[in-house]
């Protein structure tokens, strides 16, 4: 089942005229009620928030099909992207996932019990622990990532490749200040849409 109809994306002009979405209505209401305020940030960021909710649903559906939690996916993908032998230290995964060492230890313990990863001492330095994908973990993440990326590609289907590249560049520009200071971006997010 496709996520998209044969309608143009919100905010574009279709055969019947401009397409209005919930954000356009929200912004119009603020402009009517508080014309002294610049409501234009909502035109971008409320749509980002709404899109994030749709993305979350798509991702959760994939995780549910494979009986995975999002954090299990994070650990599996970190290890899979590392390349053969598909192993990292807990510290390397903590840096990627921005979680505490206690949280990471708990995650690894649970995944060891599930047979998705193993934990062993580093051959060169016995004080260093390494976490490695098992054959079952590798097979699972290779299946999951295919469905995961297919769902995300479907969300982006209304855009041309050039539009996707432009959007990616614009989003990167918005994220740069947060990426420069990753600890600050780990703070709880406010997800209200301004409405």
Image (spheres, rainbow, N blue to C red):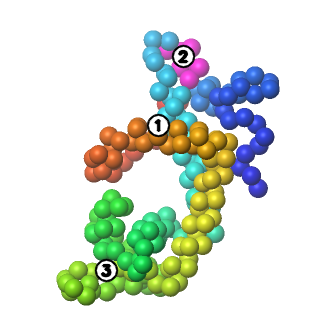
Instruction: Pinpoint residue 98: horizontal percent, then vertical percent.
Output: 33, 59
- Please provide the residue range marked out in magenta: 27-34
Type of secondary structure dominating the magenta stretch: helix
Question: Measured along the vertical axis of the image, is residue 120 above or below residue 170?
Answer: below
Badge 3 density bin: few <14, some 14–19, many ≥20, Cα 10 Å = some
Q: Nearer the viewer, residue 95 or 65?
A: 95
Q: Which residue is mark 1?
A: 170
In front: mark 2 or mark 3? 3
Q: Secondary structure at mark 3?
A: strand
Q: Badge 2 is on which residue?
A: 31
Q: Position of residue 45 (x, y in %)?
A: 49, 34
Residue wearing tag 3: 130
Upstream in sequence: badge 1 or badge 3 = 3
In this orientation, which residue lies closer to the viewer: 124 or 25?
A: 124
Q: Are dots 1 and 3 in contact, CB under 8 Å?
A: no
Q: Foreground residue, 83 or 96?
A: 83
Q: Residues within 10 Å of mark 2 (few under 14, many from 20)?
A: some
The earlier-in-sequence mark between 2 and 3 is 2
């Amino acid at each position: 089942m496709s996520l998209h109809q044969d309608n143009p994306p919100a905010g574009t002009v279709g055969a019947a005229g401009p397409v209005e979405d919930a954000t356009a209505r929200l912004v119009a209401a603020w402009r009517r009620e508080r014309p002294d305020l610049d409501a234009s940030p909502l035109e971008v960021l409320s749509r980002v928030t709404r899109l994030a909710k749709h993305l979350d649903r798509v991702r959760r559906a994939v995780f549910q099909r494979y009986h995975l939690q999002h954090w299990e996916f994070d650990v599996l993908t970190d290890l899979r992207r590392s390349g053969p032998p598909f192993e990292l230290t807990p510290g390397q995964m903590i840096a990627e996932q921005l979680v505490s060492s206690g949280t990471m230890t708990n995650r690894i313990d649970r995944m060891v019990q599930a047979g998705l990863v193993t934990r062993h001492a580093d051959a060169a330095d016995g004080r260093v622990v390494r976490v490695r994908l098992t054959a079952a973990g590798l097979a699972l993440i290779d299946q999951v990532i295919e469905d995961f990326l297919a769902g995300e590609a479907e969300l982006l289907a209304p855009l041309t490749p050039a539009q996707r590249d432009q959007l990616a560049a614009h989003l990167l520009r918005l994220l740069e200040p947060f990426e420069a200071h990753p600890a600050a971006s780990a703070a709880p997010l406010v997800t209200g849409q301004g409405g």
